[in-house]
Image (tube, helix red, strand yellow):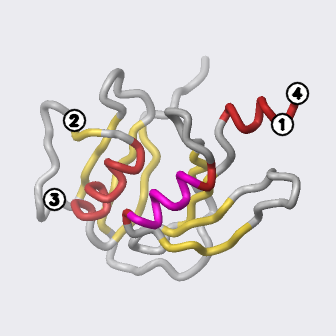
Amino acid sequence: MTSWISHVAVDCANAYELSEWWKPVLGYVDLADDPNEPGHTECVIVHPDDERVGLIFIEVPEGKSVKNRLHLDLRPRDGETRDQEVERLIGLGAKQFDDQRKPDGGGWVVLQDPEGNEFCVLRSRAEVDAKSQ
């Protein structure tokens, strides 16, 4: 027997605001039968097509104090490059935390969401495939 990941839980100070921030980052939406509202202390967002692994934002009393033990690695879609995606996310309010880009084009960029949770932006599949040819 095995298990599958239903949600990745993100502790936060404001579940509604953080879920709203992440929706355009991932192209996710609220659950159709349980929309998120201001004041909700738990907010779920999912992929619009099939509710595969969702994110659930849960309000907790303590603030973030150390590096995440678990983080998301994002890969750009729709023909965008890693660097274009980094710029888009910074435009949405992410902050650059660390830059691990390599001179050969490899590597990643570590960003933080509005509450300081780290996540990485990797190269797109097209960038990876082009480099391996």
Question: Which dot, 3 or 2, sits closer to the camera?
Answer: 2
- Check residue 131 in the rendering and tell me which mark sits there, or answer none: 1
Q: Are marks 1 and 2 in contact (CB under 8 Å)?
A: no
Which quarter of the image is occupied by the N terminus?
top right
Magenta extent: 84-91
Q: Position of residue 105 (x, y in %)?
A: 80, 52
Q: Residue at x 29, y 55 (%)?
A: 19
Q: Is residue 66 magenta?
A: no
Q: Position of residue 56 (x, y in %)?
A: 35, 49
Which quarter of the image is occupied by the C terminus?
top right
Task: Provide the residue designation for mark 3.
Answer: 40
Q: Is residue 106 left or right of residue 2?
A: right
Identify residue type, mark 1: Lys
Q: Residue at x 50, y 33 (%)?
A: 78
- Check residue 31 in the rendering and tell me which mark sits there, or answer none: 2
Disc 3: CA contacts within 10 A as few (<14), some (14-19) or many (>=20): some
- The answer to which quarter of the image holds residue 120 is bottom right
Q: Earlier in the sequence, mark 3 or mark 4?
A: 3
Q: Residue at x 39, y 69 (%)?
A: 93
Q: Main secondary structure of the magenta part?
A: helix
Q: Nearer the viewer, residue 27 or 17?
A: 27
Identify residue type, mark 4: Gln
- The answer to which quarter of the image holds residue 2 is top right
Q: Residue at x 61, y 53 (%)?
A: 121
- For the residues labelled 3 and 2, the Cα–Cα distance comes to 14 Å
- Check residue 133 in the rendering and tell me which mark sits there, or answer none: 4
Identify residue type, mark 2: Leu
Disc 2: CA contacts within 10 A as few (<14), some (14-19) or many (>=20): some
